[in-house]
């Protein structure tokens, strides 16, 4: 009789584990850090990872990291309009454009390509947060940049359609890659010098350099994996 009860308990526990595994996704590897908190963050090796869930109508989202340069996020945001989150990795520059030695980044990601709306993007800020440079490496679903189309450009190792707009007193420059890519190297310094040469901003100090996923919808729960990301700021 005791053996039968024990087997029943084990079966019930296994069934509960299966149900729970469908609610919250876990990383493929054993993460050294993870969070499901709205503002959860972790600093390691000069990078700070932010879960960063802030849009209205948002769903659950969990972030994990195997290292400072290998991390990902599981997000289950409804199929409605508006940006829900920007989970990202951030590194500080703190130098004027004219004083930049190297400001570049290499990335490799695995992302969903259907049934979602998001962009994989760099978000580069001036230290006073008056200017925002967005570098869209790929985009899927109903998403688009702020502002109006200005010109096309080949700079920083990629070809872009360039938009200019703003919000809340912030001037936003959006560089939307002409075709999607899941890996590459970007010369961010060259992009900054291109903007300065056009007189769109002056010799500003570059502050936070961020890379992540600006997610509008990912209904049912989807994985966004940064296989590798390095940001070099000297």
Image (spheres, helix red, strand yellow):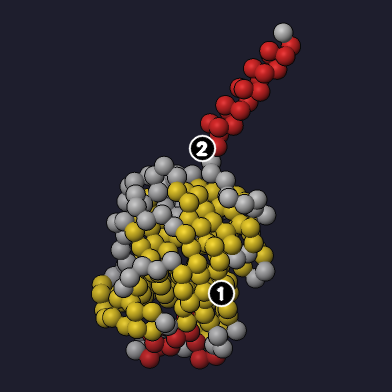
Query: Which residue lies at the image location 63% right of the left edge and 26% below the top edge?
Result: 13
**Could you tell whether 11 is left or right of 164 in the image?**
right
Above or below: residue 72 compared with residue 37 = below
Which residue occupies the extreme right position in the image? 2
Question: Reading the chain from its start, which is encountered first: label 1 or label 2?
Answer: 2
Of residues 216 and 222, the one nearer the viewer is 222
The image shows residue 95, relative to residue 44, as above or below, that is: below
- The relative height of residue 95 versus residue 19 in the rendered view (above or below) is below
- Disc marking residue 186: none
Q: Position of residue 148 (x, y in %)?
A: 25, 72
Image location (x, y in percent) of residue 166? 34, 70
Q: Quadrant of the N terminus?
A: top right
Residue tagged by mark 1? 231
- Say what secondary structure mark 2 lies in: loop
Indicate the position of residue 59 as horizontal and vertical percent values.
44, 44
Measure the C-alpha gap from mark 1 to mark 2: 33 Å
Asked whether the viewer can see residue 165, the reply is no
- Dot 1: within a 10 Å radius of its alpha carbon, few (fewer than 14), some, or many (20 or more) residues? many
Label 1 element class: strand
Residue designated by label 2: 23
Q: Residue at x 47, y 59 (%)?
A: 110
């Amino acid at each position: 009789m005791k053996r039968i009860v024990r087997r029943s308990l084990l079966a019930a526990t296994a069934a509960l584990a299966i149900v729970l595994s469908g609610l919250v996704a876990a990383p493929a590897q054993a993460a050294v850090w993870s969070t499901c908190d709205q503002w959860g963050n972790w600093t390691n090796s000069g990078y700070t990872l932010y879960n960063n869930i802030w849009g209205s109508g948002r769903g659950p989202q969990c972030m994990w990291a195997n290292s400072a340069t290998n991390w990902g996020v599981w997000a289950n945001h409804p199929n409605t309009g508006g940006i829900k989150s920007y989970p990202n990795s951030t590194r500080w520059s703190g130098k004027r454009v004219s004083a930049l030695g190297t400001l570049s980044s290499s990335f490799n990601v695995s992302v969903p390509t259907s049934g979602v709306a998001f962009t994989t993007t760099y978000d580069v800020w001036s230290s006073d947060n008056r200017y925002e440079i967005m570098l869209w490496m790929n985009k899927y679903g109903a998403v688009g940049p702020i502002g109006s189309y200005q010109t096309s450009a080949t700079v920083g190792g990629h070809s872009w359609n360039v938009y200019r707009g703003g919000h809340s007193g912030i001037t936003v420059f959006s560089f939307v890659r002409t075709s999607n890519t899941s890996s590459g190297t970007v010369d961010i310094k060259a992009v900054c010098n291109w903007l300065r040469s056009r007189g769109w901003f002056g010799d500003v100090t570059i502050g936070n350099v961020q890379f992540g996923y600006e997610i509008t919808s990912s209904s049912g729960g989807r994985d966004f994996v940064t296989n590798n990301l390095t940001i070099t700021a000297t």
